[in-house]
Image (cartoon, helix red, strand yellow):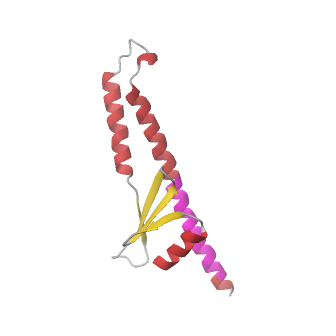
């Protein structure tokens, strides 16, 4: 299974680094990366890991802190920068999630395409 995944990633021209028990795929360089590991308990299943919990925590933290120090009497020009940072991190989170789901669908499509070619032969 690892050899097939390596072949698929090479065929799709994805930037990846092979580690001990899986792959680190740079979906969007310097922006989003995914760790793909083979599940030991369930044979034949790939598990996708990302560090998105930290991004969610940062968004919530910046929103809470920004709303706590926001003064509505001064208007939007005097709003805290924490609200803008939370919006930027949230946009980063959404774009990286879209990239991860597209990688999953491309890997699945490559597997299905390979099975169809094998059936024709």
Residue 62 position within the rendered picture, expressed as x and y whole percent measured from the top left: 35, 34
Q: What kind of secondary structure does the magenta stretch mostly adopt?
A: helix
Among the 4 quarters of the image, the one containing residue 65: top left
* Residue at image point 45% right, 66% down: 17
Q: Position of residue 115 (x, y in %)?
A: 60, 79
- Measuring from the top left, give residue 92's x and y in whole percent: 47, 44
Pick whichever, 25 or 50, lies toward us: 25
Where in the figure is residue 68, as x and y percent of width and height?
30, 25
Number of callouts? 0
Is residue 113 a member of the stretch shown in magenta?
A: yes
- Residue that appears at 38% across and 24% down: 80
Q: Nearer the viewer, residue 30 or 52?
A: 30
Left or right of 109? Residue 21 is left
Range shown magenta = 99-117
Task: For residue 1, say whether it is visible.
Answer: no
Q: Is residue 30 visible?
A: yes
**Quarter in which the C terminus is drawn:** bottom right
Q: For this rendering, which residue is in front, 25 or 17?
A: 17
Residue extending furthest bottom? 121
Locate residue 36: give its quadrant. bottom left
Is 106 in the magenta?
yes
């Amino acid at each position: 299974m690892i050899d097939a995944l390596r072949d698929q990633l090479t065929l799709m021209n994805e930037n990846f680094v092979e580690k001990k028990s899986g792959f680190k795929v740079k979906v969007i360089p310097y922006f989003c990366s995914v760790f793909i590991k083979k599940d030991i308990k369930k044979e034949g299943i790939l598990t996708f890991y990302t560090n998105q919990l930290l991004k969610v925590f940062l968004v919530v933290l910046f929103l809470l802190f920004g709303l706590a120090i926001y003064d509505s009497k001064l208007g939007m020009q005097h709003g805290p920068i924490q609200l803008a940072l939370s919006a930027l991190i949230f946009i980063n989170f959404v774009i990286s999630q879209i990239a991860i789901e597209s990688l999953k669908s491309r890997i699945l499509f490559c597997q299905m395409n390979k099975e169809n070619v094998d059936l024709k032969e």
